[in-house]
Structure formats: structure tokens, C-alpha cells
Image (spheres, rainbow, N blue to C red):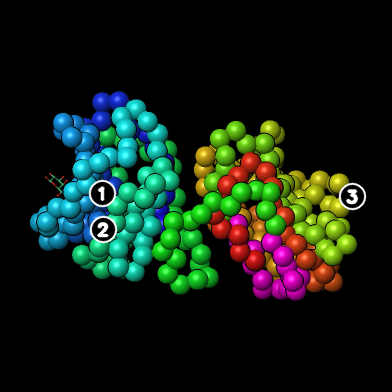
Amino acid sequence: MVTLQGVVPLDARRFQVDFQCGCSVHPRPDIAIHFNPRFHTTKPHVICNTLYLERWQAEARWPRLGLQRGASFLILFLFGNEEMKVSVNGQHFLHYRYRLPLSRVDTLGIFGDILVEAVGFLNINPFAEGGIEYPVGYEVPCSRALPKGLWPGQVIVLRGLVLPEPKDLTLSLRDQAAHVPVTLRASFADRTLAWIAPWGCKKLISAPFLFYPRRFFEVLLLCQEGGLKLALNGQGLGATGVHRQVLEQLRELRISGSVQLYCVHC
Ligand code: GAL
């Protein structure tokens, strides 16, 4: 899934998002999927098409436009086996059957009248084949059972969107007796990320603060012999020591704070 967040300028005529097979300029690369909102005509609409050997194929046209001049948007491009689905601001908008193999696409081109705020590449569920539905946001606080505790090699994956005026994000790992031996907390007020010990002692993680309002994030916790390794948005941020017996006795993962979650895997 590719996410695109941005704003349509007030005087926008058109923009395009191209899933390209290469990035050469001459000759033009094939474009497997050209997504092209047009605002300047009397009836604003969206065109999708494929450019093959420098020739546009038959245009597919959608008479509506879920986007407005002057407004911000979140577009999700969701790639299934046979077709791409597009949602705009949480509403399904169109689907487009592939005319060129998706495996040829290696470049994302964004051109025209658009202010790009963020682009995200998200694998909705790397553990299940063919996740072809739009992700459903989970409300927080939320909780997941860990019936067998954690053991070396196990991975916890959390993906979501930070809310507009965030305060904090807390991940806590609890055992049967509701003790909380491991807590990870991101605090937006002072922009710090820290491990919190059960007795409240804070161990700051010294790394740039990678959470931003209205941006996607991915937290990965990898259980290893004697501790948990942390990665945020693909960047390794060290480990915290936790005894094997403590890891085995964990029974619950709890997540709370200013986020909407799309994937919780443990
Ligand atoms: C053409 C336009 C191209 C592309 C194409 C899609 O008319 O010049 O930029 O949008 O349509 O079919």
C-alpha cells in the first residue's frame, strides 16, 4: 500500500501520480498506472491510464472527484493481485485493473499541482498473503493476548497513524499478575522516546524523534535472547534487557495514546 498525504492548491489544474517502470526521461518509461485528477474542466474528473512504449492506452475516466481545491487529503493506493484500489479520505474511490505487470514498477512519480506532505510505503500485513482490503483503523486503547509469552525470534509489529494533536503513545507488556515489566513511551510534549522500568525509572532512547502528527509510523519489537530490540520506521534503535523468564511470562500487549492503529501483529 502506498499512502499519499498532501494539499491541492487553490488554483490547481491537474496533478498525476505515476507508478512507473523505470525513471528515464528519453525515452519515457512505461507507466503501469497513471492516476490523474483534473480540476480545470467544467466537470472535474479523474483519469487513469497506462503508457506503453510511449503511447497512452485507452483512458478510464471517473466523473467524480473526491478531492477539492484548497483541501488536504489522504489517498491510499492499495495493490491487489489483479487490480489497484484507490481510496480518498477514507472512501473507496476507484479500481483499475493492471495492464502491465506490477513487478515492473520501481519508481513513483508525482507531478503537477500538488503539495506533497508525506508519502508512505506500507505493507499492511507482511505475514498474510494478498491483503487486499483497506486497512481498518483500530481504536486505542487496545490489547492483544500473548498466550505463550514472548520468545527469541518473535516479532511484534505495530503500524498506525499519529493523531493531529498527539500527547503520547504507550506500549506496555504485562504478565499474568498484571505487572508491567516493559513499557515503551513516546512523549510528544518533550519529543522523547523511552523505556520505562516497572518502578518508574525512565531510560531515554537517544535517537531523533520519528513520530509526527498525521504521519504513519511503524514500531517493530524483536524478541531476542535476553531482551527486546526496537526499530522505528525501519531504523534500529537499540535494545532493552529483559530476562528470558520475564519474557516467557508476558501475557498481554497494551497500546494506548494518540494514535489510530492499522496493524497489530504479535
Ligand atoms: C493525455 C495527457 C497526459 C495523460 C494522458 C492520460 O491527454 O496529455 O498527460 O494524462 O492524457 O490518458
In the rendering, at what x and y percent does residue 132 appear? 41, 64
Residue at image point 32% right, 49% down: 93
Q: Amino acid at mark 3?
A: Trp
Question: Which residue in the protein does label 2 denote?
Answer: 96
Residue 239 seen by the camera: no
Q: Are marks 2 and 1 in contact (CB under 8 Å)?
A: yes
Q: Ligand 1 near label 2 (Cβ, under 8 Å)?
A: no
Q: CA distance from mark 1 to mark 3?
A: 53 Å
Say which residue appears at 36% left-offset and 61% top-offset.
79
Going from N to C along the chain, the mark reached first, 1 or 3, is: 1
| For marks 2 and 3 on the same chain, the one whose residue lies earlier in the sequence | 2
Instruction: From the viewer's perspective, tell me whether residue 171 is left or right of residue 162.
Output: right
Magenta residues, start to end: 144-158
- For mark 2, give the secondary structure: strand
In front here: 117 or 125? 125
Residue annotated with mark 1: 35
Coordinates of residue 124 in the picture (x, y in percent): 49, 60
Real-space CA distance between mark 2 and mark 1, rounded to the nearest whole angstrom? 10 Å
* Sequence-first tag of 2 and 1: 1
- Image check: 252 left or right of 80? right
Is residue 100 in the magenta section?
no
Horizontal and vertical percent for residue 43? 18, 35
Question: Looking at the rendering, which quadrant does residue 106 occupy?
Answer: bottom left
User: Which mark identifies residue 199?
Assistant: 3
Q: Main secondary structure of the magenta part?
A: loop
Q: Find out if the beta carbon at label 1 lies less than 8 Å from the nearest ligand 1 atom.
A: no
Does mark 3's beta carbon lie closer than 8 Å to ligand 1? no
Instruction: Assess whether mark 3 and mark 1 are in contact (beta carbons under 8 angstroms).
Output: no
Residue sitting at x 86%, y 46%: 200
